[in-house]
Image (spheres, grey):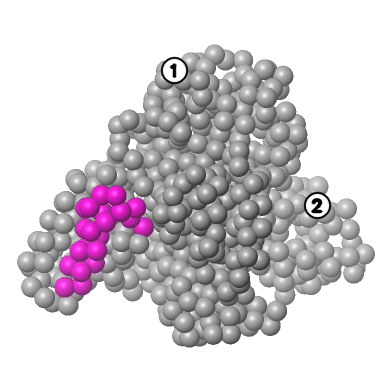
């Protein structure tokens, strides 16, 4: 985990840029997570201060939304769809395979810091289930074999 | 110079379209052949993606599904001149799957370059807006009312009535909000519009703004759709640059500004009041209704909240008239619905059709049966809060009222197919589990009821006091249906009870006589 003092200027900069925007909390949180990879718990006080909210309100918003995270992710984030369409095409087997292959559960990161594993409920790729994303890339009709290949490619980067 | 079309749609990309583009560029260049590759939307025939279309003097010739390993043989066979090859499909628009659709809302998707405004205008784009600029607000609303358009997000509320309420609500500031939080499994039509023809959504929202006097619009887009975000922002920038958004739209003196806002992975934010809370920067807690968002909406102001497809259907209505649109469909379901075939189906895709065809026709005649080749056992229509329908109900016409009559939901038109390996007790349990995961937590029937629901289903399946627990599950579903604040808790019983009623054997209960 990085020291917040090195991240603080980034956070203040993002807060500054969004000062005049109506309903700016989600765009601010996105901005921070896009830049730092997560929302450092120590940033909550600065965000609350800038928006004149309580720390509890800011924390409440961060924890409400599945996408926001308060710990640093692995180098790559793998999201596996758990929704009905993917289930109809053996998504559960893929989910189990992924957990076994990476030796982690959902919301965890591999010991080498390469991969974080997250569940997702629908990627809108239901015509080619089961689907996963690796970072911002979507992959369809993913079999356990294809999963291993995709991760091998990413792992080598 | 040969023009090719290869889709930038997420599903095409998920099957390797980007790699096919690179391979064609490299291999054509090596042969000294000059190609221009247009990145279009998808035609929606997803079993044929990545699809490569070649522009020839006789029209477009399609090949698919194309893998990188096919590129060499395609070029060798003369695909750039539209010649024969094992992957040759001819004119995609002549395939029955495409030809038998009624593409009103999706007229341009797959045809044009989605972010090229000149392409949009050359293909009948902005004709609806042009008409709207010459009409009084009430006349615009009347066209939408006359069209019979009902909310395509699933609730099917008459769009014209909603617009009229906002029109008649006095306020200095009003808003148009597009609900692009398409979180239902089995649905992708919103995504296809936003990636494949974003201008039609922008035009629809602009017309909505003119109709009710709103000058600011927001598209609340789910974070799972990064490609749609890119396409929308490119199209919005082009619309501003060409005077179709901003302070003086086409020199009319009218103002409409538009911005994309990203969600953050909360399914509940597809519920309109939760979405508004989220746009205001809060937790997505559902609001009590009344007041309706049309009266007290975003930042407390009168607000139209419409789904992507509802808004994207407005331009054709304003272009060709409410009567034109109303002449499609059956009963009180007027116009067309972009149906989405997904899950375990041989020919998945987007099928825009007038209301009224039967589910069976769609599943077998066009869908080609299951992908696994096994019998289709259960079909969930209308997303995770829709009922599972069984074989005996497949002749139901795709119509809001006909589905309601069999205690099912047509909703957004998403259809997820399961073959006979599905365990319906598992699916019922999953429906409750999903509600646990995604409930906003404001009302007790949804927040606690779903947790208890998982437990009760587990006890039934484990054989613990089966009969008593089945009564308890039904009672719980009754409480959720009538006691929840919104559709999340209120409709979770649809998949649960339909699974229990139609497939009791999967719960270890006696089959119906």
Question: What percent of the width, then of the height, locates residue B86?
Answer: 69, 68
Do circles 1 and 2 both sit on a common chain? yes
Magenta highlight range: B438-459
Mark on residue B22?
none
Report whether residue B10 is seen: no
Question: What percent of the width, then of the height, locates residue A157?
Answer: 70, 79
Quadrant location of the C terminus of chain B? bottom left
Q: Is residue B452 magenta?
A: yes
Q: Is residue B414 magenta?
A: no
Q: Label 1, label 2: how many angstroms apart (C-alpha)?
A: 52 Å
In depth, the one of A22 and B76 nearer the eye is A22
Circle 1 sits on which residue? B170
> Compared with residue B77, is residue B357 higher up or lower down, i.e. above or below?
above
Q: Quadrant of residue A145?
A: bottom right
View extreme (right): residue: B32
The reply, left or right, for residue B427 in relation to residue B312 is left
Report whether residue B169 is seen: yes
Mark on residue B3?
2
Report the chain holding disc 1. B
Question: What percent of the width, then of the height, locates residue B294?
Answer: 40, 28
């Amino acid at each position: 985990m990085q020291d917040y003092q090195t991240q603080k200027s980034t956070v203040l900069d993002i807060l500054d840029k969004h000062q005049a925007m109506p309903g700016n909390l989600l765009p601010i949180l996105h901005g921070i997570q896009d830049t730092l990879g997560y929302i450092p718990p120590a940033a909550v006080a600065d965000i609350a201060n800038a928006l004149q909210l309580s720390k509890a309100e800011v924390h409440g918003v961060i924890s409400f939304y599945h996408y926001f995270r308060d710990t640093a992710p692995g180098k790559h984030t793998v999201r596996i769809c758990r929704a009905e369409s993917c289930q109809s095409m053996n998504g559960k087997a893929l989910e189990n395979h992924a957990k076994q292959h990476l030796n982690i559960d959902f919301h965890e990161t591999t010991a080498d810091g390469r991969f974080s594993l997250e569940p997702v409920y629908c990627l809108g790729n239901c015509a080619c289930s089961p689907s996963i994303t690796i970072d911002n890339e979507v992959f369809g009709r993913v079999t356990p074999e294809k999963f291993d290949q995709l991760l091998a490619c990413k792992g080598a980067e | 110079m040969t023009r090719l079309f290869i889709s930038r749609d997420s599903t095409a990309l998920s099957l390797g379209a980007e790699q096919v583009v690179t391979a064609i560029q490299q291999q054509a260049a090596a042969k000294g052949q000059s190609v221009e590759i247009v990145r279009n939307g998808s035609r929606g025939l997803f079993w044929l993606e990545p699809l490569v279309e070649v522009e020839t003097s006789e029209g477009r010739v399609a090949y698919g599904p194309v893998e990188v390993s096919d590129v060499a043989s395609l070029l060798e066979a003369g695909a750039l001149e539209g010649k024969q090859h094992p992957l040759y499909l001819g004119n995609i628009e002549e395939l029955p799957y495409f030809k038998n659709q009624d593409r009103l809302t999706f007229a341009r998707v797959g045809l044009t370059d989605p972010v090229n405004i000149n392409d949009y205008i050359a293909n009948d784009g902005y004709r609806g807006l042009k008409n709207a600029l010459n009409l009084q607000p009430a006349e615009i609303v009347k066209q939408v009312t006359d069209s019979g358009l009902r909310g395509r997000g699933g609730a099917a509320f008459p769009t014209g009535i909603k617009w009229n309420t906002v029109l008649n609500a006095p306020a200095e500031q009003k808003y148009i909000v597009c609900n692009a939080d398409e979180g239902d499994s089995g649905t992708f039509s919103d995504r296809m519009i936003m990636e494949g023809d974003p201008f039609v959504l922008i035009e629809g929202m602009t017309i909505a703004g003119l109709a009710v006097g709103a000058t600011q619009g927001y598209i609340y887009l789910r974070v799972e759709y990064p490609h749609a975000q890119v396409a929308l922002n490119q199209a919005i920038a082009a619309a501003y640059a060409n005077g179709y958004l901003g302070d003086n739209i086409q020199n009319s003196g009218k103002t409409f500004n538009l911005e994309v806002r990203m969600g953050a992975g909360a399914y509940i934010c597809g519920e309109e009041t939760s979405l508004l809370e989220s746009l205001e920067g809060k937790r997505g807690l559902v609001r009590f209704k009344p007041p309706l968002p049309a009266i007290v909406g975003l930042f407390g102001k009168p607000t139209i909240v419409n789904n992507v497809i509802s808004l994207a259907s407005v331009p054709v209505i304003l272009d060709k008239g409410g009567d034109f649109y109303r002449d499609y469909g059956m009963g009180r379901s007027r116009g067309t619905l972009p149906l989405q075939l997904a899950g375990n189906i041989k020919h998945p895709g987007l099928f825009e059709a007038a209301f009224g065809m039967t589910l069976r026709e769609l599943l077998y005649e066009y869908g080609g049966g299951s992908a696994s080749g096994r019998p289709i056992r259960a079909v969930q229509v209308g997303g995770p809060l829709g009922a599972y329908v069984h074989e005996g109900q497949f002749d139901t016409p795709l119509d809001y009222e006909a589905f309601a009559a069999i205690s099912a939901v047509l909703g957004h038109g998403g259809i997820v197919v399961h073959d006979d390996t599905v365990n319906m007790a598992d699916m019922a349990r999953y429906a409750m589990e999903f509600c646990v995961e995604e409930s906003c937590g404001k009302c007790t029937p949804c927040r606690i009821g779903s947790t208890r629901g998982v437990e009760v289903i587990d006890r039934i399946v484990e054989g613990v006091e089966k009969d008593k627990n089945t009564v308890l599950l039904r009672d719980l579903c009754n409480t959720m249906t009538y006691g929840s604040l919104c559709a999340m808790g209120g409709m979770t019983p649809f998949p649960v009870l339909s699974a229990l009623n139609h497939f009791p054997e999967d719960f270890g209960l006696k089959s119906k006589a």
